[in-house]
């Protein structure tokens, strides 16, 4: 059993994710004002937890890295549940086990880190001292099925809003874990083939969305030309 996973993302009409490359709003408002619409929609989803990819988190919140010479892992890795200071949780996958945290929360929500079983014991001690929860997702820290099962069973997360970037979205897509797509369309264009898109799977699978179809649940026109599309993932059993 896994939490319900809603991929909630805002992209330009050509599916690109970098706001600084989008064309300006037609009515003279700032891009930030329209990004606020995306945030408001996210709150309407009312999930138990939300999640960024590591690159997004480090760029926006914690740019520094943790360093240790002793990389000895613990013998029997087990989840650690720190004291919670919020009803909602923030989740991040850190397969390198090296994010240096300046606080135990992101936008007021307590952090849970997804780690590899080989994470150094010193790093785990550091997280405990910072009152940051963690769990393990296989030897490489990339087993999303294990991570989501632990989130449900150990942390009580029944629903999670996955908010990009494209690489983490692509990993969840390939794993077949996404139940719903909440796509907020910004009324502007990027136009560059080099810009990241909503789903950016990095791996050997040549068709990461194979066996997954989208059923439109709703289409809502919001203010300032923003459109909110909701799709349900219909999934065939993969062989």
Image (cartoon, rainbow, N blue to C red):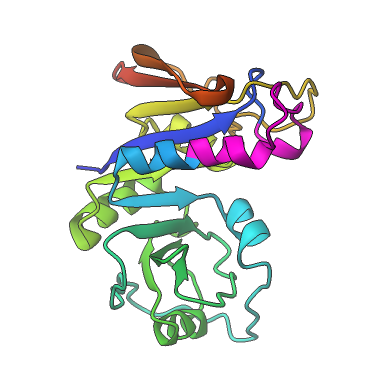
**At 41% from the left edge and 17% from the top edge, which residue is drawn?**
220
Which quadrant is the N terminus positioned in? Answer: top left
**At 40% from the left edge and 83% from the top edge, which residue is drawn?**
128
Horizontal side of residue 194 vs 3, given as left or right: right
* Image position, residue 106 (x, y; %): 48, 64
Which quadrant is the C terminus positioned in? Answer: top left
Horizontal side of residue 176 vs 188, given as left or right: left
The image quadrant of residue 155 is bottom left
The image quadrant of residue 30 is top right
Residue toward you, 38 or 67: 38
The reply to whether the magenta stretch includes residue 97 is no
Does residue 33 sit above or below 205 in this rendering?
Answer: below
* Image position, residue 52 (x, y; %): 51, 50
**At 48% from the left edge and 56% from the top edge, which residue is drawn?**
93
The reply to whether the magenta stretch includes residue 29 is yes
Q: Which residues are magenta?
A: 17-38
* Image position, residue 126 (x, y; %): 48, 84
The image quadrant of residue 185 is top right
Q: Is residue 50 visible?
A: yes
* Image position, residue 27 (x, y; %): 69, 23
**At 65% from the left edge and 80% from the top edge, which residue is drawn?**
67
Q: How many marks?
A: 0
Does residue 77 sit above or below 220 in this rendering?
Answer: below
Q: Is residue 208 visible?
A: no
Residue found at the very far front of the displayed protein: 28
Residue toward you, 20 or 137: 20
Does residue 99 sit above or below 238 in this rendering?
Answer: below
């Amino acid at each position: 059993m896994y939490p319900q996973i809603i991929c909630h993302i805002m992209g330009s009409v050509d599916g690109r994710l970098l706001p600084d490359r989008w064309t300006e709003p037609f009515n003279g408002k700032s891009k930030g004002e329209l990004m606020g619409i995306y945030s408001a929609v996210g709150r309407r989803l009312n999930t138990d937890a939300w999640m960024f990819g590591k690159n997004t988190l480090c760029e926006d919140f914690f740019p520094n890295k943790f360093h240790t010479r002793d990389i000895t892992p613990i013998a029997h890795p087990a989840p650690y549940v720190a004291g919670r200071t919020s009803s909602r949780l923030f989740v991040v996958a850190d397969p390198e086990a090296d994010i240096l945290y300046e606080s135990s929360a992101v936008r007021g929500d307590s952090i849970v880190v997804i780690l590899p079983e080989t994470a150094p014991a010193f790093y785990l001690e550091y997280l405990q001292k910072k009152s940051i929860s963690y769990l393990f997702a296989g030897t490489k820290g990339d087993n999303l099925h294990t991570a989501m099962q632990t989130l449900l069973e150990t942390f009580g997360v029944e629903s999670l809003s996955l908010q990009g970037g494209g690489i983490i979205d692509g990993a969840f897509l390939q794993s077949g874990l996404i139940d719903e797509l909440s796509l907020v369309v910004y009324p502007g264009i990027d136009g560059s083939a080099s810009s990241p898109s909503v789903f950016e799977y990095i791996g050997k699978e040549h068709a990461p969305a194979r066996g997954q179809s989208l059923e439109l649940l709703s289409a809502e026109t919001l203010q300032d030309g923003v459109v909110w599309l909701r799709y349900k993932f219909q999934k065939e059993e993969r062989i």
